[in-house]
Amino acid sequence: MVQYVNAHLDASFAALADVTRRGVLEQLGRAEASITELADKFDMTLTGMKKHVGILEEAGLVLTEKVGRVRTCRIGRRRLEEVAAWVERYHQLWDARFCELDKVVEQLKRKEKLHGSRKAK
Amino acid sequence: MVQYVNAHLDASFAALADVTRRGVLEQLGRAEASITELADKFDMTLTGMKKHVGILEEAGLVLTEKVGRVRTCRIGRRRLEEVAAWVERYHQLWDARFCELDKVVEQLKRKEKLHGSRKAK
DNA sequence: TAGATACTGAACCATATGGTTCAGTATGTG
DNA sequence: CACATACTGAACCATATGGTTCAGTATCTA
């Protein structure tokens, strides 16, 4: 189970590691768009944009649907929530760790104050 | 300015797009470690682990310091906060967008209820 | 000083990535 | 039907990635 999430995270983070794809997500956050529209906006060939969209879709970060000749892209939420959850979890873990360090520093300071304190830095 | 953040994000997300490196971060979240310790824990050559740490360091996600022959690795926070901030921002943007969609759906439902509703799908 | 330990760097390898062009196919439109 | 539009797929290219091995260098320790 954890492995699946890990695979998701691999794909999601890899998908996010490209400024064009993050731009596409931002764009789709505002409104749906076709491949052509995205290709125009990001000054890229249709084929190139198709690949980006494919990567985002593979990662579950966007959903697409083709009706007639146009494929419409929109944001997919679930994977995104997974990413947010991962980051949040580590954020907290790190905060906790750094709070501990802060406490240690505090304690050191207090100790210094107790014994003869030399000039403050 | 925005470009710099984007470069950071590229490096950060790319660094996070590997299960070993996420594992290293998790490990360092608990306690600092040397390259050797990490290589052992993740069953990898020293050289391989050195590369991973290099990528994480380049991305600003870990800090290292070499004293004597051992290089000690610890978590770096700032970049991580940037990543968290990015995800958070988009999360909100998407939430907002989906709230709007929800409202639209609500409205459609209400409308359907008002006019003669045919069988629910 | 002689090992042993801990890292470092160069070189190599297979595969992935971010793009392109070119040649389609499928769908609308006059 | 003829043409334009919108996408799709294959092939190619340069560069990056995730790993390895091998050969160092620098630092402890007995």
Image (cartoon, coloured by chain):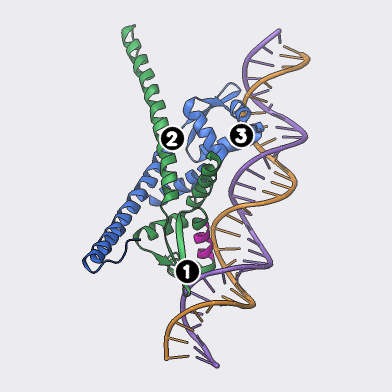
Chain colours: A blue, B green, C purple, D orange
What residue is shown with label 3?
A49
Above-or-below relation of C20 to D1: below
Mark linked to residue B66: 1
Circle 2 crowding by C-alpha within 10 Å: few under 14, some 14–19, many from 20: some
Q: Amino acid at mark 1?
A: Lys
Q: Identify which residue is drawn at 60% across, 25% down.
A: A37
Q: Earlier in the sequence, mark 2 or mark 1?
A: 1
Q: Classify residue B98 by image quadrant.
A: top left
- Element class at badge 3: helix
Q: Position of residue B5 (x, y in %)?
A: 51, 43
Above-or-below relation of D23 to B84: below
Q: Amino acid at mark 3?
A: Met
Question: Which is the main secondary structure of the residues drawn in magenta?
Answer: helix
Q: Residue furthest front?
A: A119
Q: Amino acid at mark 2?
A: Tyr
Image check: D20 left or right of B66? right
Q: Identify which residue is drawn at 51% across, 25% down.
A: A32
